Image: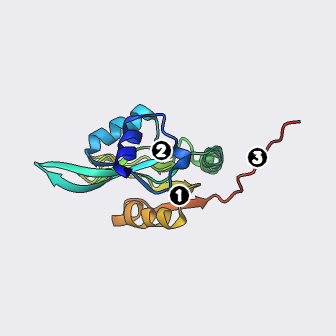
């Protein structure tokens, strides 16, 4: 029965995500290209991640896991952190030390594909194949920002240690965990 609902959610964009218990394995045995296509199609950047599971006939297949549901609080938080980072970097604008906002740029590394909530880095040269953040030659960001709303602190820390900071890909990861009650913030008068 679970497989039936999982398949429906993967193929139907009108899923009732608020009823899901996270993390949730949404699809199994999916290629990274299919994962990226669906992520773009449904505009769910940063909410899903892909991890390789097996190789079949020379094709790497993996699982798509939903670990975060975007909320207004999540988006406001990442927006404010980004605003503060840009403000602090303003003194080095138009210098050799200028810091660029890369946003939620998709990254690939060996058996994983992830999208952070925000990234920053100075101008950098291309890296050797296949060590780039795009799986090719794009340099990795220096700073990654992750805002965890429905995502657990454990998952966010594991991802920071085992993906972002692994092999010195990224220099620093900032994790913000949002805790809030579900009461309405505004009342009708």
Q: Give the image location of residue 68, x and y in percent.
A: 51, 51
Which is more foreground, mark 3 or mark 1? Answer: 3
Query: Residue at 56% of width from left, 56% of height from top?
Result: 148
The 10 Å Cα crowd at callout 1, few under 14, some 14 to 19, many 20 or more, is: some
Of labels 3 and 1, earlier in sequence is: 1
Single out the residue that lies furthest toward the front. 1
Tag of residue 6 = none
Identify the mark at residue 104; answer none if there is no mark.
Answer: 2
Q: Tell me the residue that label 3 is attached to.
A: 184
Label 3, residues with CA under 10 Å away: few <14, some 14-19, many ≥20: few
User: Which mark is nearer the camera, 2 or 3?
Assistant: 3
Q: Nearer the viewer, mark 2 or mark 1?
A: 1
- Secondary structure of residue under mark 1: loop
Quadrant of residue 38 within the rendered picture: top left
Q: x%, y% of residue 15?
A: 48, 39
Q: Is residue 39 left or right of residue 32?
A: right
Q: Position of residue 5 (x, y in %)?
A: 40, 45
Question: From mark 2 to mark 1, how far is it between C-alphas?
Answer: 17 Å
Q: Earlier in the sequence, mark 2 or mark 3?
A: 2
Residue located beneath label 1 in the image: 151
Q: Reply above or below: 179 against 75.
A: below
Residue 26 position, x and y percent, is: 38, 48
| Badge 3 element | loop
Q: Quadrant of residue 174?
A: bottom right
| Visual colour scheme | rainbow
With 114 as the anchor, is 173 left or right in this view?
right
């Amino acid at each position: 029965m679970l497989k039936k609902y999982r398949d429906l959610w993967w193929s139907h964009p009108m899923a009732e995500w608020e009823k899901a218990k996270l993390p949730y394995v949404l699809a199994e045995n999916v290629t990274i290209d299919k994962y990226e296509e669906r992520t773009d199609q449904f505009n769910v950047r940063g909410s899903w991640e892909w991890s390789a599971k097996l190789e079949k006939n020379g094709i790497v297949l993996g699982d798509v896991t939903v670990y975060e549901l975007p909320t207004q609080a999540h988006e406001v938080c990442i927006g404010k952190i980004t605003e503060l980072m840009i403000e602090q970097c303003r003194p080095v604008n138009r210098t050799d030390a200028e810091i660029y906002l890369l946003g939620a740029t998709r990254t690939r590394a060996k058996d994983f594909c992830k999208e952070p909530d925000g990234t920053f880095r100075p101008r950098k040269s291309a890296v050797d194949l296949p060590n780039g953040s795009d799986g090719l030659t794009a340099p990795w960001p220096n700073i990654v920002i992750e805002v965890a709303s429905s995502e657990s602190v454990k998952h966010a820390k594991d991802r920071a240690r085992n993906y972002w900071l692994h092999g010195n890909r990224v220099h620093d990861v900032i994790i913000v965990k949002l805790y809030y009650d579900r009461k309405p913030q505004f009342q009708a008068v």
